[in-house]
Amino acid sequence: MSSGEIRAVEASRGARGQQPFLEEIFRPLHRAEQRRWARTYLRGLLHVTGRKTPPRMAQAHALPPAAAQGLHQFINASPWDWEPVRRRLALRIAAETTPYAWTVAELIIPKRGEHSVGVHRRLDPVSGLTVNCQRAVGLFLAAGNHCFPVDWSLVLDESWCRDRQRRLRARVPEAETARPVGGHVLDLAARAVAQTWLPDVPWVLDLTRCDDATGVMAGLARQRQDIVCEVDPGQVVFAGDRFPTVITAGELMEGRYARQQTAIIHQVADGATAAIPIRTYAGTVRLPRRSTGRDDDSVRYRVLQRPATDGGRPARYWITSLTDRSVEDVLAPVRSRAAVRTALAALQERFGVLDFEGRSFPGWHHHMTMASAAYAFRHLPDRQSLARLDPAPAVPAEAAG
Protein backbone atom coordinates (compact mmCIF):
# COMPACT_ATOMS: atom_id res chain seq x y z
CA MET A 1 0.00 0.00 0.00
CA SER A 2 1.44 3.36 -1.01
CA SER A 3 1.87 6.23 1.44
CA GLY A 4 -0.96 8.03 -0.34
CA GLU A 5 -3.27 5.06 0.14
CA ILE A 6 -2.29 4.84 3.83
CA ARG A 7 -3.15 8.50 4.33
CA ALA A 8 -6.50 7.94 2.60
CA VAL A 9 -7.33 4.99 4.89
CA GLU A 10 -6.28 6.94 7.99
CA ALA A 11 -8.39 9.88 6.93
CA SER A 12 -11.39 7.62 6.42
CA ARG A 13 -10.95 6.03 9.83
CA GLY A 14 -10.48 9.45 11.43
CA ALA A 15 -13.69 10.73 9.89
CA ARG A 16 -15.61 7.69 11.14
CA GLY A 17 -14.11 8.10 14.61
CA GLN A 18 -15.00 11.75 14.72
CA GLN A 19 -18.56 11.30 13.53
CA PRO A 20 -20.21 10.14 16.81
CA PHE A 21 -18.55 12.93 18.79
CA LEU A 22 -19.49 15.59 16.25
CA GLU A 23 -23.04 14.32 15.83
CA GLU A 24 -23.62 14.37 19.57
CA ILE A 25 -22.07 17.76 20.31
CA PHE A 26 -23.63 19.55 17.34
CA ARG A 27 -27.05 17.87 17.50
CA PRO A 28 -28.65 21.09 18.87
CA LEU A 29 -27.87 22.79 15.55
CA HIS A 30 -31.20 22.23 13.84
CA ARG A 31 -30.09 22.60 10.22
CA ALA A 32 -27.89 20.04 8.49
CA GLU A 33 -26.04 22.88 6.78
CA GLN A 34 -25.07 24.34 10.18
CA ARG A 35 -23.80 20.98 11.39
CA ARG A 36 -21.65 20.60 8.27
CA TRP A 37 -20.13 24.04 8.75
CA ALA A 38 -19.52 23.22 12.42
CA ARG A 39 -17.55 20.11 11.46
CA THR A 40 -15.51 22.08 8.92
CA TYR A 41 -14.77 24.87 11.39
CA LEU A 42 -13.76 22.42 14.11
CA ARG A 43 -11.35 20.64 11.77
CA GLY A 44 -9.88 24.00 10.85
CA LEU A 45 -9.25 24.77 14.52
CA LEU A 46 -7.64 21.37 14.97
CA HIS A 47 -5.36 21.30 11.95
CA VAL A 48 -4.63 24.83 10.66
CA THR A 49 -1.35 26.24 11.92
CA GLY A 50 -1.01 29.90 12.85
CA ARG A 51 -4.08 32.11 13.07
CA LYS A 52 -7.34 30.18 12.94
CA THR A 53 -9.37 32.40 10.62
CA PRO A 54 -11.94 31.35 7.99
CA PRO A 55 -9.72 32.32 5.01
CA ARG A 56 -6.77 30.35 6.42
CA MET A 57 -9.02 27.36 7.16
CA ALA A 58 -10.35 27.37 3.60
CA GLN A 59 -6.88 27.85 2.10
CA ALA A 60 -5.25 25.13 4.23
CA HIS A 61 -7.80 22.54 3.14
CA ALA A 62 -7.90 23.71 -0.52
CA LEU A 63 -11.59 24.47 -0.20
CA PRO A 64 -13.57 26.45 -2.79
CA PRO A 65 -13.35 30.26 -2.46
CA ALA A 66 -16.92 30.43 -1.16
CA ALA A 67 -16.00 28.25 1.83
CA ALA A 68 -14.21 31.09 3.63
CA GLN A 69 -17.33 33.23 3.44
CA GLY A 70 -19.46 30.28 4.53
CA LEU A 71 -17.31 29.70 7.61
CA HIS A 72 -17.45 33.41 8.43
CA GLN A 73 -21.23 33.41 8.10
CA PHE A 74 -21.56 30.31 10.28
CA ILE A 75 -19.73 32.03 13.13
CA ASN A 76 -20.93 35.62 12.77
CA ALA A 77 -24.37 35.52 11.18
CA SER A 78 -25.91 32.06 11.63
CA PRO A 79 -28.50 32.23 14.46
CA TRP A 80 -27.59 29.06 16.36
CA ASP A 81 -27.76 28.88 20.13
CA TRP A 82 -24.38 28.10 21.70
CA GLU A 83 -25.68 27.16 25.16
CA PRO A 84 -27.15 23.73 24.20
CA VAL A 85 -23.90 22.88 22.41
CA ARG A 86 -21.91 23.75 25.53
CA ARG A 87 -24.25 21.68 27.71
CA ARG A 88 -23.73 18.64 25.49
CA LEU A 89 -19.99 19.24 25.51
CA ALA A 90 -19.90 19.37 29.33
CA LEU A 91 -21.99 16.22 29.56
CA ARG A 92 -19.71 14.37 27.15
CA ILE A 93 -16.62 15.42 29.10
CA ALA A 94 -18.17 14.34 32.40
CA ALA A 95 -19.19 10.99 30.90
CA GLU A 96 -15.76 10.17 29.45
CA THR A 97 -13.58 11.35 32.35
CA THR A 98 -13.51 11.39 36.16
CA PRO A 99 -13.84 15.08 37.08
CA TYR A 100 -12.47 16.26 40.40
CA ALA A 101 -13.00 20.05 40.40
CA TRP A 102 -14.63 23.05 38.77
CA THR A 103 -12.38 26.06 38.25
CA VAL A 104 -12.35 29.33 36.34
CA ALA A 105 -9.70 31.32 34.50
CA GLU A 106 -9.56 34.83 33.15
CA LEU A 107 -8.55 35.36 29.53
CA ILE A 108 -7.28 38.67 28.15
CA ILE A 109 -7.65 38.99 24.37
CA PRO A 110 -5.60 41.88 22.91
CA LYS A 111 -7.41 43.96 20.27
CA ARG A 112 -6.30 46.80 18.01
CA GLY A 113 -9.58 48.56 17.28
CA GLU A 114 -12.56 49.59 19.36
CA HIS A 115 -15.45 47.95 17.53
CA SER A 116 -15.16 44.30 18.63
CA VAL A 117 -17.73 43.40 21.26
CA GLY A 118 -16.56 44.04 24.81
CA VAL A 119 -13.29 45.72 23.82
CA HIS A 120 -12.06 48.32 26.29
CA ARG A 121 -8.89 49.70 27.81
CA ARG A 122 -7.81 48.39 31.20
CA LEU A 123 -4.76 48.28 33.40
CA ASP A 124 -3.08 44.88 33.33
CA PRO A 125 -2.21 44.15 36.99
CA VAL A 126 0.61 41.80 35.96
CA SER A 127 2.50 44.03 33.52
CA GLY A 128 1.31 47.39 34.87
CA LEU A 129 0.50 48.47 31.29
CA THR A 130 -2.78 49.73 29.91
CA VAL A 131 -4.04 47.36 27.21
CA ASN A 132 -6.83 47.45 24.65
CA CYS A 133 -8.55 44.11 24.98
CA GLN A 134 -11.53 41.86 25.48
CA ARG A 135 -11.77 40.29 28.92
CA ALA A 136 -13.37 36.87 29.35
CA VAL A 137 -13.97 34.38 32.14
CA GLY A 138 -13.94 30.68 31.29
CA LEU A 139 -15.43 27.78 33.24
CA PHE A 140 -13.33 24.60 33.23
CA LEU A 141 -14.00 21.04 34.38
CA ALA A 142 -10.81 19.47 35.74
CA ALA A 143 -10.31 15.78 35.02
CA GLY A 144 -7.10 13.77 34.87
CA ASN A 145 -4.28 15.94 33.57
CA HIS A 146 -6.55 18.38 31.75
CA CYS A 147 -8.95 21.21 32.41
CA PHE A 148 -11.73 21.22 29.79
CA PRO A 149 -13.40 24.56 28.90
CA VAL A 150 -17.18 24.19 29.00
CA ASP A 151 -18.57 27.74 29.28
CA TRP A 152 -17.55 31.36 28.76
CA SER A 153 -18.63 34.82 29.85
CA LEU A 154 -17.56 38.13 28.29
CA VAL A 155 -16.82 40.97 30.72
CA LEU A 156 -18.29 44.32 29.66
CA ASP A 157 -17.22 47.63 31.15
CA GLU A 158 -19.48 50.63 31.79
CA SER A 159 -18.85 52.09 28.33
CA TRP A 160 -20.77 49.17 26.86
CA CYS A 161 -23.77 49.96 29.02
CA ARG A 162 -23.97 53.67 28.20
CA ASP A 163 -23.77 53.44 24.39
CA ARG A 164 -26.98 51.86 23.12
CA GLN A 165 -26.02 52.12 19.45
CA ARG A 166 -22.76 50.36 20.12
CA ARG A 167 -24.64 47.55 21.85
CA LEU A 168 -27.07 47.23 18.96
CA ARG A 169 -24.27 47.03 16.40
CA ALA A 170 -22.57 44.27 18.40
CA ARG A 171 -25.90 42.52 19.11
CA VAL A 172 -25.36 42.54 22.88
CA PRO A 173 -28.45 41.16 24.69
CA GLU A 174 -30.30 43.49 27.05
CA ALA A 175 -29.54 41.22 30.01
CA GLU A 176 -25.78 41.62 29.55
CA THR A 177 -24.54 44.38 31.87
CA ALA A 178 -21.29 45.59 33.37
CA ARG A 179 -20.55 43.64 36.54
CA PRO A 180 -17.48 42.52 38.47
CA VAL A 181 -15.63 39.36 37.49
CA GLY A 182 -17.00 37.72 40.64
CA GLY A 183 -20.51 38.18 39.28
CA HIS A 184 -19.52 36.36 36.10
CA VAL A 185 -18.06 33.51 38.17
CA LEU A 186 -21.35 33.12 40.04
CA ASP A 187 -23.33 33.24 36.79
CA LEU A 188 -21.16 30.48 35.34
CA ALA A 189 -21.64 28.47 38.53
CA ALA A 190 -25.41 28.92 38.45
CA ARG A 191 -25.58 27.60 34.89
CA ALA A 192 -23.41 24.59 35.79
CA VAL A 193 -25.39 23.81 38.95
CA ALA A 194 -28.65 23.96 36.98
CA GLN A 195 -27.41 20.99 34.93
CA THR A 196 -28.10 18.36 37.57
CA TRP A 197 -26.42 15.60 35.54
CA LEU A 198 -23.02 17.28 35.84
CA PRO A 199 -20.65 16.20 38.64
CA ASP A 200 -20.93 17.66 42.14
CA VAL A 201 -17.25 18.42 42.74
CA PRO A 202 -15.59 21.28 44.67
CA TRP A 203 -15.01 24.71 43.18
CA VAL A 204 -11.28 25.45 43.29
CA LEU A 205 -10.67 29.15 42.76
CA ASP A 206 -7.83 31.64 43.07
CA LEU A 207 -9.46 34.71 44.66
CA THR A 208 -6.26 36.44 45.72
CA ARG A 209 -6.91 39.28 43.24
CA CYS A 210 -10.69 39.23 43.40
CA ASP A 211 -12.30 42.47 44.58
CA ASP A 212 -15.13 40.57 46.25
CA ALA A 213 -13.76 37.21 47.35
CA THR A 214 -16.27 37.08 50.21
CA GLY A 215 -19.16 37.59 47.82
CA VAL A 216 -17.97 34.82 45.51
CA MET A 217 -17.53 32.31 48.35
CA ALA A 218 -20.88 33.26 49.90
CA GLY A 219 -22.58 33.02 46.51
CA LEU A 220 -21.25 29.52 45.96
CA ALA A 221 -22.42 28.59 49.48
CA ARG A 222 -25.92 29.77 48.58
CA GLN A 223 -25.76 27.41 45.61
CA ARG A 224 -24.72 24.62 48.02
CA GLN A 225 -21.32 24.20 46.40
CA ASP A 226 -18.17 23.16 48.25
CA ILE A 227 -15.14 25.37 47.80
CA VAL A 228 -11.37 25.36 48.11
CA CYS A 229 -10.43 29.00 47.50
CA GLU A 230 -7.02 30.61 47.73
CA VAL A 231 -7.40 34.03 49.34
CA ASP A 232 -5.32 37.06 50.19
CA PRO A 233 -3.91 37.13 53.75
CA GLY A 234 -6.12 40.18 54.33
CA GLN A 235 -9.32 38.16 53.80
CA VAL A 236 -11.64 38.93 56.73
CA VAL A 237 -13.24 36.08 58.69
CA PHE A 238 -15.14 35.67 61.97
CA ALA A 239 -13.42 33.37 64.46
CA GLY A 240 -14.94 32.03 67.68
CA ASP A 241 -18.47 31.05 68.61
CA ARG A 242 -19.83 32.92 71.64
CA PHE A 243 -17.87 36.12 71.04
CA PRO A 244 -16.79 36.13 67.38
CA THR A 245 -13.64 38.06 66.57
CA VAL A 246 -13.17 39.93 63.31
CA ILE A 247 -9.74 38.94 62.06
CA THR A 248 -7.85 38.43 58.81
CA ALA A 249 -6.73 35.02 57.61
CA GLY A 250 -3.12 36.09 57.95
CA GLU A 251 -3.56 37.28 61.53
CA LEU A 252 -5.54 34.19 62.42
CA MET A 253 -2.73 31.86 61.41
CA GLU A 254 -0.16 33.78 63.43
CA GLY A 255 -1.73 32.44 66.64
CA ARG A 256 0.61 29.60 67.52
CA TYR A 257 -1.82 27.81 69.86
CA ALA A 258 -4.77 28.13 67.50
CA ARG A 259 -3.27 26.16 64.65
CA GLN A 260 -2.29 22.60 63.89
CA GLN A 261 0.67 21.58 61.77
CA THR A 262 0.82 18.73 59.31
CA ALA A 263 2.64 17.94 56.09
CA ILE A 264 1.60 16.65 52.71
CA ILE A 265 3.87 14.66 50.44
CA HIS A 266 4.54 16.24 47.07
CA GLN A 267 6.24 14.51 44.15
CA VAL A 268 9.08 16.48 42.60
CA ALA A 269 11.52 15.83 39.76
CA ASP A 270 13.00 12.38 39.11
CA GLY A 271 10.37 10.63 41.22
CA ALA A 272 11.60 12.16 44.47
CA THR A 273 9.19 13.42 47.09
CA ALA A 274 9.15 16.40 49.42
CA ALA A 275 7.15 17.16 52.54
CA ILE A 276 5.23 20.44 52.34
CA PRO A 277 4.27 21.93 55.72
CA ILE A 278 0.62 22.94 56.04
CA ARG A 279 -0.99 24.68 58.98
CA THR A 280 -4.70 24.49 59.71
CA TYR A 281 -6.73 26.61 62.07
CA ALA A 282 -7.87 24.44 64.97
CA GLY A 283 -11.46 25.65 64.80
CA THR A 284 -13.79 26.85 62.08
CA VAL A 285 -14.56 30.36 60.87
CA ARG A 286 -17.44 32.16 59.21
CA LEU A 287 -17.54 34.74 56.46
CA PRO A 288 -18.89 38.28 56.94
CA ARG A 289 -22.14 39.12 55.25
CA ARG A 290 -21.63 41.60 52.45
CA SER A 291 -24.75 43.66 53.11
CA THR A 292 -24.79 44.05 56.88
CA GLY A 293 -21.24 43.29 57.96
CA ARG A 294 -22.60 40.67 60.37
CA ASP A 295 -21.33 37.11 60.39
CA ASP A 296 -23.16 34.41 58.48
CA ASP A 297 -23.91 31.38 60.69
CA SER A 298 -25.05 29.12 57.87
CA VAL A 299 -21.68 27.77 56.70
CA ARG A 300 -18.47 27.02 58.58
CA TYR A 301 -15.06 27.03 56.94
CA ARG A 302 -11.51 25.92 57.63
CA VAL A 303 -8.45 28.07 57.05
CA LEU A 304 -5.24 26.47 55.76
CA GLN A 305 -1.84 28.05 55.37
CA ARG A 306 1.29 27.07 53.55
CA PRO A 307 3.94 29.02 55.50
CA ALA A 308 6.45 31.31 53.86
CA THR A 309 9.66 29.59 52.80
CA ASP A 310 13.26 30.53 53.50
CA GLY A 311 13.66 31.26 49.80
CA GLY A 312 11.31 34.22 50.04
CA ARG A 313 8.13 32.56 48.74
CA PRO A 314 5.24 34.22 50.60
CA ALA A 315 2.70 32.31 52.65
CA ARG A 316 -0.45 31.08 50.90
CA TYR A 317 -3.92 30.79 52.41
CA TRP A 318 -7.00 28.75 51.53
CA ILE A 319 -10.56 28.84 52.82
CA THR A 320 -12.56 25.64 52.37
CA SER A 321 -16.00 24.35 53.23
CA LEU A 322 -14.61 20.80 53.32
CA THR A 323 -14.35 20.78 57.09
CA ASP A 324 -14.54 16.99 57.46
CA ARG A 325 -11.78 16.10 54.97
CA SER A 326 -8.09 15.48 55.54
CA VAL A 327 -5.61 18.16 54.55
CA GLU A 328 -4.46 15.96 51.67
CA ASP A 329 -8.02 15.59 50.36
CA VAL A 330 -8.68 19.32 50.65
CA LEU A 331 -5.57 20.39 48.78
CA ALA A 332 -5.52 17.61 46.18
CA PRO A 333 -7.95 19.45 43.82
CA VAL A 334 -5.75 22.56 43.96
CA ARG A 335 -3.66 20.95 41.20
CA SER A 336 -6.45 22.11 38.87
CA ARG A 337 -5.05 25.64 39.09
CA ALA A 338 -1.85 24.55 37.34
CA ALA A 339 -3.86 22.47 34.87
CA VAL A 340 -6.11 25.39 33.95
CA ARG A 341 -3.10 27.60 33.21
CA THR A 342 -1.79 24.90 30.88
CA ALA A 343 -5.19 24.61 29.20
CA LEU A 344 -5.46 28.37 28.77
CA ALA A 345 -2.04 28.49 27.12
CA ALA A 346 -3.02 25.65 24.76
CA LEU A 347 -6.29 27.36 23.86
CA GLN A 348 -4.35 30.46 22.88
CA GLU A 349 -1.49 28.74 21.07
CA ARG A 350 -3.26 25.84 19.33
CA PHE A 351 -7.05 26.30 19.38
CA GLY A 352 -7.51 29.91 18.29
CA VAL A 353 -9.32 31.57 21.21
CA LEU A 354 -7.47 34.81 20.39
CA ASP A 355 -8.25 34.69 16.67
CA PHE A 356 -11.91 35.71 16.44
CA GLU A 357 -12.16 38.46 13.81
CA GLY A 358 -15.85 39.30 14.05
CA ARG A 359 -17.42 42.07 16.12
CA SER A 360 -20.67 40.63 17.48
CA PHE A 361 -21.59 39.12 20.83
CA PRO A 362 -23.12 35.96 19.27
CA GLY A 363 -20.14 35.57 16.93
CA TRP A 364 -17.68 35.70 19.86
CA HIS A 365 -19.64 33.06 21.77
CA HIS A 366 -19.90 30.87 18.66
CA HIS A 367 -16.12 31.00 18.16
CA MET A 368 -15.36 30.26 21.83
CA THR A 369 -17.78 27.33 21.75
CA MET A 370 -16.04 25.86 18.73
CA ALA A 371 -12.59 26.33 20.31
CA SER A 372 -13.83 24.54 23.45
CA ALA A 373 -15.16 21.65 21.36
CA ALA A 374 -11.83 21.39 19.51
CA TYR A 375 -9.92 21.26 22.81
CA ALA A 376 -12.21 18.52 24.12
CA PHE A 377 -11.93 16.52 20.92
CA ARG A 378 -8.15 16.69 21.11
CA HIS A 379 -7.86 15.71 24.77
CA LEU A 380 -10.70 13.36 25.62
CA PRO A 381 -9.21 9.87 26.21
CA ASP A 382 -10.64 8.12 23.18
CA ARG A 383 -10.03 11.07 20.88
CA GLN A 384 -6.30 11.53 21.33
CA SER A 385 -5.13 9.22 18.52
CA LEU A 386 -7.85 10.20 16.08
CA ALA A 387 -7.31 13.93 16.63
CA ARG A 388 -3.81 13.66 15.17
CA LEU A 389 -5.27 12.72 11.80
CA ASP A 390 -6.18 15.25 9.16
CA PRO A 391 -9.42 14.04 7.59
CA ALA A 392 -10.81 15.77 4.54
CA PRO A 393 -13.22 18.49 5.71
CA ALA A 394 -16.92 18.17 5.03
CA VAL A 395 -17.85 21.21 2.97
CA PRO A 396 -21.52 22.16 2.54
CA ALA A 397 -22.72 21.80 -1.03
CA GLU A 398 -23.40 25.52 -1.46
CA ALA A 399 -19.69 26.30 -0.88
CA ALA A 400 -18.56 23.64 -3.37
CA GLY A 401 -20.66 25.15 -6.11
Image (cartoon, rainbow, N blue to C red):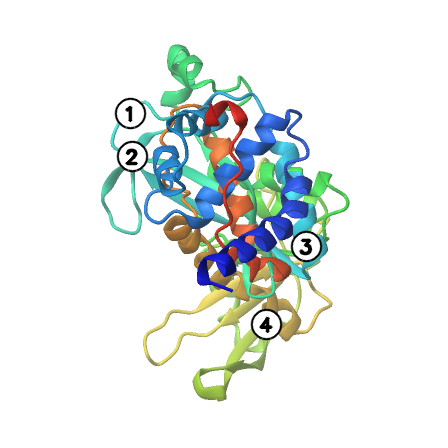
Q: Mark 1 points at which residue?
A: 114
Earlier sequence position, callout 1 versus callout 4 = 1
Mark 2, residues whose alpha carbon is within 10 Å: few (<14), some, or many (≥20)?
Answer: some
Q: Mark 4 points at which residue?
A: 280
Q: What element carries label 3?
A: loop
In the rendered structure, which amino acid carries the disc numbered 2?
Answer: Lys
Q: Are circles 2 and 1 on residues that touch, CB within 8 Å?
A: yes
- Residue 133 in the image: state x and y as whole percent: 32, 36
Please name whichever residue, 350 or 126, is drawn nearer the observer in this view of the structure. Answer: 350
In the rendered structure, which amino acid carries the disc numbered 1?
Answer: Glu
CA gap, disc 1 and disc 3 = 40 Å
CA gap, disc 3 and disc 2 = 36 Å
Answer above or below: position of 318 versus 58. Answer: below
Mark 3, residues whose alpha carbon is within 10 Å: few (<14), some, or many (≥20)?
Answer: some
CA gap, disc 2 and disc 1 = 8 Å
Q: Mark 2 points at which residue?
A: 111
Q: Are circles 2 and 4 on residues that touch, CB within 8 Å?
A: no
- Between circles 2 and 4, the one closer to the viewer is 2
**Residue 59 in the figure: left or right of residue 172:** left
Answer above or below: position of 254 versus 392. Answer: below
Determine which of the numbered discs, if any, sits on residue 75 in the image.
Answer: none
Please name whichever residue, 88 or 254, is drawn nearer the observer in this view of the structure. Answer: 88
In the rendered structure, which amino acid carries the disc numbered 4?
Answer: Thr
Q: Mark 3 points at which residue?
A: 226
Earlier sequence position, callout 1 versus callout 3 = 1
Earlier sequence position, callout 3 versus callout 2 = 2
Earlier sequence position, callout 2 versus callout 4 = 2
Q: Is mark 1 on a helix, strand or loop?
A: loop
